[in-house]
Amino acid sequence: MTLEASNPRTQDADKKKDALAWQPRKDMHLINQWVPRLDGPAKVSGRATYTHDVRLPNMAYARVLRCPHPAAKVTLDLEPAKKIPGVLAVIALVDATKWLGQPVAAVAATTPEIAEDGIRAIVAKFEAQPFAVSPAQSLAENAPKVGSNGNVMRDEKRDTRAEGVENLAQAEELLKSCAATAGGKWSVPVQHHASLETHGVVVDYRGNEDATVYCSTQGTFTIPGDAAGELGLQAKQVTGIVDYMGGGFGSKFGLGLEGATACKLAKELKRPVHLMFTRSDELSESCLLFKRLPLLSRKKDTSQPVLNCVEAYRHK
């Protein structure tokens, strides 16, 4: 008879494996079970109220005028828009733009259609300025400055990903120890989140010491503070409500430009303002993502490729 000695490590591993094994469905409570979505019935029945659906007494509807140039100096004549019956307020937003599609003026009116008429009535003159909308253009010699700190944004701490690497110099030293490196440039086309519900808010402010903001956003808890700053209130005086959101995918955080504009109009009118961007508005804003990932390495003591270090540059 032969006796085999048991290995304590093997026994421990078997116990852990059994403990982590997928249990029969009847023995599980949440995992591998049908869990009803609490908001499912309201959404599929059409009862869910999104920001776009909010309707309040005496509410005004707003639209924005966008710049057709990537960079321009702006001169506006708002008087023709103010003369249209039903137009309640017309405001200028900027006198110079920094990106294609940047809003330059906003109109609030009794109906969305009249607000659109008001936007078309504004006499806008755009003096186009030098611009850079691609990485190649922004990195060219004597390129127009895209941001206040120049056209190359670099954060040494965030450019390094290897554990224990704290700055770019350490990353360079790490690369010297790699058996092989590979480099290249990759770019992606313009991408848009295309949320089913566009960006927008309803700001219910009537000149009192409180306000309610209905917002299509993923950043619910930032709304009171952001809106309070625009309305001249304290954060505790503003209630932010996001009952349902028609998609965000990382594109909806905070009050946003649409929210700040609606707050300005509501503060002037002392009545609720409904401002939802149109799909055309959404698609007219420019964006570009570009990355350079030049450093792929292989360990010396194995045939399996291992990514030791990546140096990435993002231009926008």
Image (tube, rainbow, N blue to C red):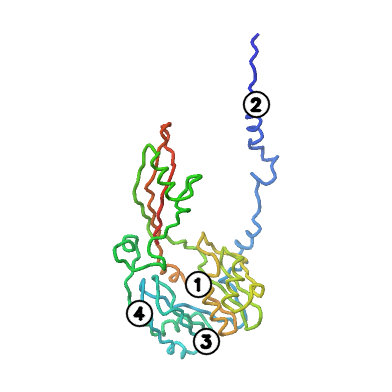
Label located before the other in sequence (3 or 4): 3
Disc 4: which residue: 126
- Estimate the spatial distance between the alpha carbons at disc 1 and disc 3, rounded to whole Å: 20 Å
State the SS at label 4.
strand
- Estimate the spatial distance between the alpha carbons at disc 3 and disc 4, rounded to whole Å: 25 Å
Question: Which residue ends up furthest to the top in the rendered image?
Answer: 1
Amino acid, disc 2: Gln
- Estimate the spatial distance between the alpha carbons at disc 1 and disc 4, rounded to whole Å: 21 Å
State the SS at label 3.
strand
Q: Is residue 124 above or below residue 151?
A: below
Disc 1: which residue: 257
Give the quarter of the image for residue 60.
bottom right
Marks 2 and 3 in Cβ contact (< 8 Å): no
Label located before the other in sequence (2 or 3): 2
Q: Quadrant of the C terminus?
A: bottom left
Disc 2: which residue: 11
Residue 156 image offset from top left, x and y in percent: 45, 54
Residue 52 image offset from top left, x and y in percent: 55, 71
